[in-house]
Image (tube, rainbow, N blue to C red):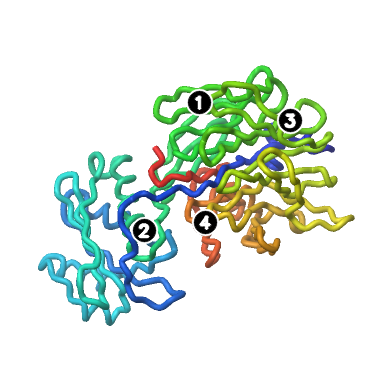
């Protein structure tokens, strides 16, 4: 059976190539603040103590910040009942005993107090025995509301940047498909809610600014690509190639263009259309009857990676954004029955994640652009549809390791995985680029 035929049904789209093609442009961080230069052993995670938080919503705020540090995999949160009791006593006296925290190998102490809608943050350098950073951070809404939680996540991300030099990813969100709707969930697994109307939908993708999403929707004439404004709920069609199959949209890094796959009966090719829905779509690939789907942009917007069946089975290829200079990326040996598909370009431009069939099961892999070195990241269960976080270190993906499909998050450096959704049937994840997605 040809790949095009498998793409015609919703089930086949989900199982084979119905992944969201995602632009992976690295979001420019314009938030003030730089790494504060804490001293800790290179190659290790700095130990951090988070003091109990005074003020409205303090307990929740402390729990969220501590969890964000933990999930970011760059900070070791020093906790436990004895530690928290000592921290509580010191917070009550507004005094930091650096000797105690140094004995526990802490590099920093984080002290937060809330007054009205402002959180005052002090980050103490334990080794230098001084305040290393002090900032007032606005909080949005009432404690434990959606806006408040996102502003706390953003604060945790900025503190992580001060300590490690890399901004955290807590204030990001992940799209996924379950049943007949698209859902969004915070990066810590809270706040999930639907963001599309009921219908047959696939392949969600974030715009670079996080304000709109694109996805494929089954309509009377076939599959259509639409863009939805998350704030207003307004939609407009981007597909200027009506009828047949229009799937796997991906935004360009500047948000001006949408690349998607279009086909009618004999194969599919990539097309480029204005995200505004105006003007005619331009054909990018010439597949000559093969299937070319799941595009993903390089961070600079100059190149594409995509899945193509032109070799007789799916492999990952790259090309210039106009379709020229096509090159095979994934290793190929004649006679092999390989299936490598669903690429996503990392925000730093060094890697492409994809799924590869091994012994009849899909696993998540990465390949370097420099020398085509392949690394296998998963082995437990069936793992599909990788999507990079903005930090270029974490990936979300669909996994069957619990017995049903759920979305998991993987730290590509340590191999640590955590379950994100508890929503059987969740699949086709797409990670937002911005750390302030609505």
Q: Nearer the viewer, mark 4 or mark 1?
A: 4
Indicate which disc, 2 or 4, sits on the residue closer to the N terminus. Answer: 2
Residue 278: quadrant of the picture = top right
Report crowding for label 1: few under 14, some 14 to 19, many 20 or more residues within 10 A (C-alpha). few
The residues tagged by marks 3 and 4 sit, at their Cα atoms, a distance apart of 33 Å
Give the image location of residue 227, x and y in percent.
53, 28
Q: Sequence-wise, which precedes: disc 2 or disc 3?
A: 3
Is residue 427 among what the camera can see? no
Mark 4 lies on a secondary structure that is loop
Residue 118 vs 237, above or below: the answer is below
Q: Residue at x 53, y 25 (%)?
A: 276
Label drawn at residue 197: 1
- Location of residue 23 (image quadrant): top right
Number of the label disc, if any, that sits on residue 67: 2
Residue at horizontal 33 percent and vertical 50 percent from the top? 31
Element marked by disc 1: loop
| Apparent side of residue 1 relative to residue 36 in the rendered image (left or right) | right
Residue at 73 percent across and 48 percent down: it is: 317
Whichever of labels 1 and 2 marks the residue nearer the N terminus, that label is 2
Q: CA distance from mark 2 to mark 4?
A: 20 Å
Nearer the camera: disc 3 or disc 4: 4
- Tell which tag, 2 or 4, sits nearer the viewer: 4
SS of the residue at dot 3?
loop
Mark earlier in primary sequence (3, 1): 3
Which residue lies under the disc numbered 3?
A: 8
The numbered dot on residue 386 is none
Q: Position of residue 34 (x, y in %)?
A: 33, 60
Judging by the rendered image, the residue that carries numbered circle 4 is: 392
Instruction: Name the N-terminal-most of marks 3 and 4.
Output: 3
């Amino acid at each position: 059976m040809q790949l095009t035929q498998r793409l015609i049904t919703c089930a086949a789209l989900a199982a084979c190539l119905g992944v969201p093609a995602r632009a992976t442009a690295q979001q420019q961080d314009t938030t003030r603040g730089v790494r504060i230069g804490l001293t800790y052993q290179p190659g290790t995670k700095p130990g951090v103590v988070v003091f109990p938080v005074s003020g409205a919503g303090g307990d929740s705020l402390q729990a969220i910040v501590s969890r964000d540090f933990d999930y970011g995999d760059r900070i070791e949160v020093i906790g436990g009942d004895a530690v928290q009791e000592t921290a509580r006593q010191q917070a009550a006296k507004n005094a930091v005993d650096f000797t105690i925290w140094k004995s526990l190998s802490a590099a920093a102490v984080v002290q937060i107090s809330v007054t009205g809608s402002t959180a005052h943050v002090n980050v103490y350098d334990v080794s230098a025995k001084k305040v290393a950073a002090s900032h007032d951070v606005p909080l949005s809404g009432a404690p434990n509301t959606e806006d408040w939680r996102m502003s706390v996540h953003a604060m945790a991300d900025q503190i992580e940047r001060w300590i490690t030099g890399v901004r955290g990813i807590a204030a990001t969100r992940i799209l996924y498909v379950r049943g007949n709707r698209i859902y969004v969930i915070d990066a810590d697994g809270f706040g999930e809610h639907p963001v599309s109307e009921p219908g047959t939908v696939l392949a969600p993708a974030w715009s670079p600014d996080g304000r709109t999403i694109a996805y494929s929707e089954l309509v009377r004439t076939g599959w259509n690509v639409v863009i939805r404004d998350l704030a207003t709920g307004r939609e407009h069609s981007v597909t200027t190639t009506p009828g047949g199959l229009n799937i796997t949209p991906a935004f360009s890094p500047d948000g001006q263009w949408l690349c998607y796959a279009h086909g009618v009966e004999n194969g599919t090719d990539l097309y480029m259309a204005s995200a505004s829905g105006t003007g005619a779509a331009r054909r990018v690939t010439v597949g000559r009857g093969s299937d070319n789907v799941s595009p993903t942009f390089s961070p600079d917007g100059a190149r594409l990676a995509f899945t193509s069946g032109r070799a007789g089975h799916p492999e990952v290829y790259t090309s210039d954004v106009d379709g020229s200079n096509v090159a095979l990326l994934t290793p190929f040996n004649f006679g092999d029955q390989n299936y490598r598909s669903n690429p996503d370009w990392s925000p730093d431009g060094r890697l492409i994640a994809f799924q590869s069939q091994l012994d009849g099961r899909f696993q998540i892999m990465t390949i370097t652009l420099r020398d085509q070195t392949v690394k296998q990241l998963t082995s437990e269960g069936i793992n599909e549809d990788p999507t990079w976080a903005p930090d270029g270190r974490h990936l979300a993906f669909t996994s069957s390791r619990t017995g049903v499909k759920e979305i998991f998050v993987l730290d590509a450096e340590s191999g640590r995985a955590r379950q994100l959704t508890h929503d059987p049937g969740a699949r086709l994840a797409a990670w937002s680029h911005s750390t302030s997605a609505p």
